Image (tube, rainbow, N blue to C red):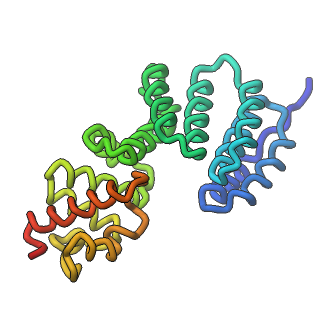
């Protein structure tokens, strides 16, 4: 009987921590070392999945797509793996700047693999899909569609970046829910959640003045791609600030 070497899960998890912590190159080196440790197709697939993910994060999409080809050869005939590959391909589309295409693909994945989403084994994938859909919908300024997805995502246990709270606050702004908007904008800019803390002390409360504050340039503005679109966001912030009595 041939004994198959098993993947070192501690080193594997360490590589993932490196990659998602911003050290993708070091993570990929470790993953490639791990790839030689196992002959199991399933385990090799997990290593390649994350190698392709980190390549995508570095915008080395052509290399990532080559790894997806390898991944498909290893992972065949399993519905969960088909879904994971489809989500990875959507991520690579976004990495190439094709946000609308990525969103379209994720919408399709959500429907096609609906049978998976009640399983704890695929909970991580469902949450990743919803997180990404919410963010991409905000990029498209489809805030009404994004809001229920972001509200659902808020209940997920996974960590949330400042961008998430900005997007949720922005959607509440557009939905005229000013108290909630202020709460989540406070979280986005690192302020307290006490009333008024995100909007008090802004100084110049014209749209131009707001543009110079951390509220709008700390990296949380959705990538709408046009100055006029961003300008409309600043106007919305200004109008909201006035509506809740934080500006003159």
User: Left of 213 or right of it: where is 219?
Assistant: right
Q: Is residue 43 visible?
A: no
User: Left of 125 or right of it: where is 134?
Assistant: left
Tag count: 0
Q: Is residue 232 above or below residue 47?
A: below
Q: Is residue 97 above or below residue 43?
A: below
Quadrant of the image occupied by residue 53? top right
Residue 212, x across and y down, in percent:
33, 76
Residue 138, x across and y down, in percent:
35, 47
Residue 218, x across and y down, in percent:
40, 69
Q: Residue furthest top?
A: 77
Q: Residue at x 62, y 31 (%)?
A: 85
Q: Residue furthest right?
A: 1
Q: Residue at x 66, y 59 (%)?
A: 18
Q: Which residue is nearer to you in this view: 111 or 218? A: 218
Q: Which residue is nearer to you in this view: 204 or 170? A: 204
Q: Is residue 133 visible?
A: yes
Q: Split into 4 quadrants, where in the image is the C terminus?
A: bottom left
Quadrant of the image occupied by residue 93? top right
Residue 130, x across and y down, in percent:
41, 39
Q: Is residue 121 above or below residue 37?
A: above
Q: Residue at x 72, y 56 (%)?
A: 27
Q: Which residue is nearer to you in this view: 9 or 176? A: 176
Q: Residue at x 58, y 29 (%)?
A: 86
Q: Is residue 91 above or below residue 166?
A: above
Q: Split into 4 quadrants, where in the image is the N terminus?
A: top right
């Amino acid at each position: 009987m041939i004994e198959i070497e098993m993947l070192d899960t501690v080193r594997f998890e360490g590589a993932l921590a490196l990659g998602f912590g911003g050290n993708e190159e070091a993570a990929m080196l470790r993953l490639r070392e791990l790839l030689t440790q196992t002959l199991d197709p399933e385990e090799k697939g997990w290593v390649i999945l994350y190698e392709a993910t980190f390549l995508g994060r570095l915008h080395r999409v052509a290399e990532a797509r080559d790894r997806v080809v390898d991944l498909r050869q290893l992972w065949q005939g399993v519905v969960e793996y088909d879904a994971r590959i489809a989500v990875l391909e959507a991520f690579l589309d976004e990495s190439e700047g094709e946000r609308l295409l990525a969103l379209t693909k994720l919408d399709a994945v959500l429907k096609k693999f609906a049978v998976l989403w009640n399983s704890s084994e695929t909970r991580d994938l469902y949450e990743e899909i919803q997180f990404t859909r919410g963010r991409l919908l905000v990029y498209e300024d489809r805030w009404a569609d994004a809001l229920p997805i972001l509200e659902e995502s808020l209940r997920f246990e996974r960590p949330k970046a400042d961008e998430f709270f900005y997007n949720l606050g922005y959607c509440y702004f557009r939905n005229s829910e000013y108290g909630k908007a202020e709460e989540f904008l406070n979280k986005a800019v690192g302020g307290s959640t006490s009333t008024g803390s995100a909007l008090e002390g802004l100084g110049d409360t014209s749209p131009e003045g707001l543009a110079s504050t951390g509220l709008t340039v700390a990296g949380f503005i959705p990538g709408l791609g046009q100055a006029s679109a961003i300008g409309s966001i600043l106007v919305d912030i200004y109008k909201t600030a006035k509506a809740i009595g934080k500006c003159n």
